[in-house]
């Protein structure tokens, strides 16, 4: 799952640079931490 997130991050960096004129380094770590946790919580709840 982490490799997919990193791939999406790399693909979206040019768009982020064009729209926001920069890349926020803390967002990288926040996404790598929060997305798996939220996924492990919400997916089982949806399947119930």
Image (tube, rainbow, N blue to C red):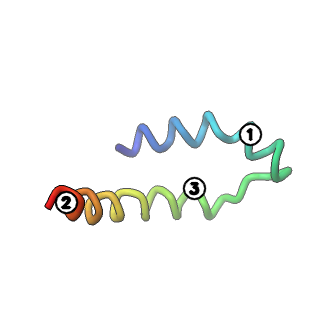
Q: Identify the residue at image location x=69%, y=41%.
A: 13
Q: Is residue 2 left or right of residue 45?
A: right
The secondary element bearing badge 1 is classed as: helix
Q: Identify the residue at image location x=26%, y=56%.
A: 43
The secondary element bearing badge 2 is classed as: helix
Q: Are marks 3 and 1 in contact (CB under 8 Å)?
A: no
Graded by Cα atoms within 10 Å as few (under 14), some (14 to 19) or many (20 or more), the crowding at tag 3 reads: few
Residue 5 spot, x, y in % from top left: 47, 44
The secondary element bearing badge 3 is classed as: helix
Q: Residue furthest left?
A: 48
Residue 40 spot, x, y in % from top left: 26, 60
Q: Is residue 29 left or right of residue 2?
A: right
Quadrant including the N terminus? top left
Q: Which mark is residue 40?
A: none
Calculate the distance from the C-alpha at mark 1 to the C-alpha at mark 2. Answer: 32 Å
Q: Identify the residue at image location x=83%, y=42%.
A: 18
Calculate the distance from the C-alpha at mark 3 to the C-alpha at mark 1. Answer: 15 Å
Q: Earlier in the sequence, mark 3 or mark 2?
A: 3
What residue is disc 1 on?
15
Q: Is residue 12 left or right of residue 42?
A: right
Graded by Cα atoms within 10 Å as few (under 14), some (14 to 19) or many (20 or more), the crowding at tag 2 reads: few
- In which image quadrant can residue 48 be found? bottom left
Examine the rendered structure and indicate whether residue 26 appears above or below residue 16.
Answer: below
Q: Which mark is residue 44?
A: 2
Graded by Cα atoms within 10 Å as few (under 14), some (14 to 19) or many (20 or more), the crowding at tag 1 reads: few
Of badges 3 and 1, nearer the viewer stands 1
Calculate the distance from the C-alpha at mark 3 to the C-alpha at mark 2. Answer: 25 Å
Residue 12 spot, x, y in % from top left: 65, 39
Q: Earlier in the sequence, mark 3 or mark 1?
A: 1
What residue is disc 3 on?
28
Q: Earlier in the sequence, mark 1 or mark 2?
A: 1
């Amino acid at each position: 799952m982490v490799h997919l997130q990193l791939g999406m991050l790399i693909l979206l960096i040019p768009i982020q640079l064009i729209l926001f004129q920069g890349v926020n380094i803390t967002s990288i770590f926040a996404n790598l931490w929060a997305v798996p946790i939220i996924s492990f919580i919400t997916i089982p709840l949806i399947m119930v």
